[in-house]
Image: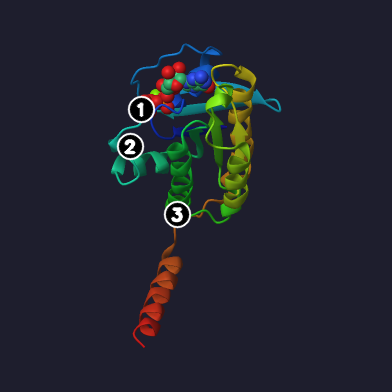
Amino acid sequence: MDVNIVVMGTESVGKSALTVRLLTRRFIGEYGDIESIYSHSFMVDGREISLNIWDSPYSEDSSMETSLFEKKVQWADGYILVYSICDRASFNSVSRLIQTIKSTKDYLNADKAPIVIVGNKRDLHHRRTVLSEEGRLLALNTDCHFYEVSAAENYHSVLMVFHGLVDRMKDAKLTTKKPLGFKGIVKSMSAVFARRRTDSF
Ligand SMILES: Nc1nc2c(ncn2[C@@H]2O[C@H](COP(=O)(O)OP(=O)(O)OP(=O)(O)O)[C@@H](O)[C@H]2O)c(=O)[nH]1
Ligand SMILES: [Mg+2]
């Protein structure tokens, strides 16, 4: 199985730290502005899973309104949405990301959308501004998985994030909407016209 994963979230939440932790098992502290798609594989239930992981620095160019953002969303089969438990604004942006991904990808079964929410920097609990319960509740309300981790302190929990996503993707792969055939297009056009007619009354 070959899958594309994109790591998203606002500035300095630890997207690169999580990615590099998975790839090298190490935390190196500073990551700079690297934009890269990394390859990584591991075995799950005797099958090799090859991951392509797209990590990019947050910038206005990767904010939700741009075509680069749309390209990333389309490219990916699975999403790791990262916030920092010390940064409320980063947490708020995760729920907007979820809505945008779900509406862009148009999943048949949105409750199986291959999205994992990650609250990072768990080691900085003295500076926490987002409670674990808030993360858990967001995941519950949006049908995503949730993990709280520390890329700085723990390799295993980071590994669980990626494994958890791959597990979820196995289900979701079967439920992405197929492109509309001719009949489908006619059907949706008539739905649009029907709506227009009722709107005008
Ligand atoms: N204490 C602590 N610091 C972390 C953790 N993860 C990342 N950091 C630090 O947070 C800063 C930002 O980490 P990055 O991985 O570069 O964040 P990013 O999301 O890739 O940021 P951009 O690429 O600029 O969007 C760095 O100084 C990291 O050392 C963590 O789990 N705990
Ligand atoms: Mg980065």
Q: Which class describes the residues within 10 Å of circle 3: few (<14), some (14-19), or many (20+)?
A: few
| Frontmost residue, 172 versus 19 | 19
Residue 5: x %, y % from top left: 49, 33
Seen in the picture, residue 113 relative to 78 is either above or below; the reply is below
Give the Cα distance between marks 2 and 3.
17 Å
Give the Cα distance between marks 2 and 1.
8 Å
Can you tell which mark lies on residue 103?
3
Residue 129: x %, y % from top left: 52, 35
Q: Which residue is mark 2?
A: 62
- Earlier-in-chain disc, 2 versus 3: 2
Seen in the picture, residue 112 relative to 11 is either above or below; the reply is below
Residue at the spot 45% in from the left edge and 56% down from the top edge: 179
Tell me if residue 136 can be seen.
yes
Amino acid type assigned to the residue bearing label 3 in the image? Ser
Q: Which class describes the residues within 10 Å of circle 2: few (<14), some (14-19), or many (20+)?
A: some
Marks 2 and 1: CB-CB under 8 Å?
yes
Please state which of the two labelled residues, at mark 2 or mark 3, is closer to the viewer: 2
Tell me if residue 36 can be seen.
no
Amino acid type assigned to the residue bearing label 1 in the image? Pro
Seen in the picture, residue 159 relative to 179 is either above or below; the reply is above
- Earlier-in-chain disc, 3 versus 1: 1
Amino acid type assigned to the residue bearing label 2 in the image? Ser
| Frontmost residue, 117 versus 92 | 92
Q: Is mark 1 within 8 Å of ligand 1?
A: yes
Q: Secondary structure at mark 1?
A: loop
Marks 3 and 1: CB-CB under 8 Å?
no
- Earlier-in-chain disc, 2 versus 1: 1
Image quarter of residue 131? top right
| Frontmost residue, 130 versus 21 | 130
Residue at the spot 51% in from the left edge and 55% down from the top edge: 177
Q: Which residue is mark 1?
A: 57
Placement of the C terminus among the 4 image quadrants: bottom left
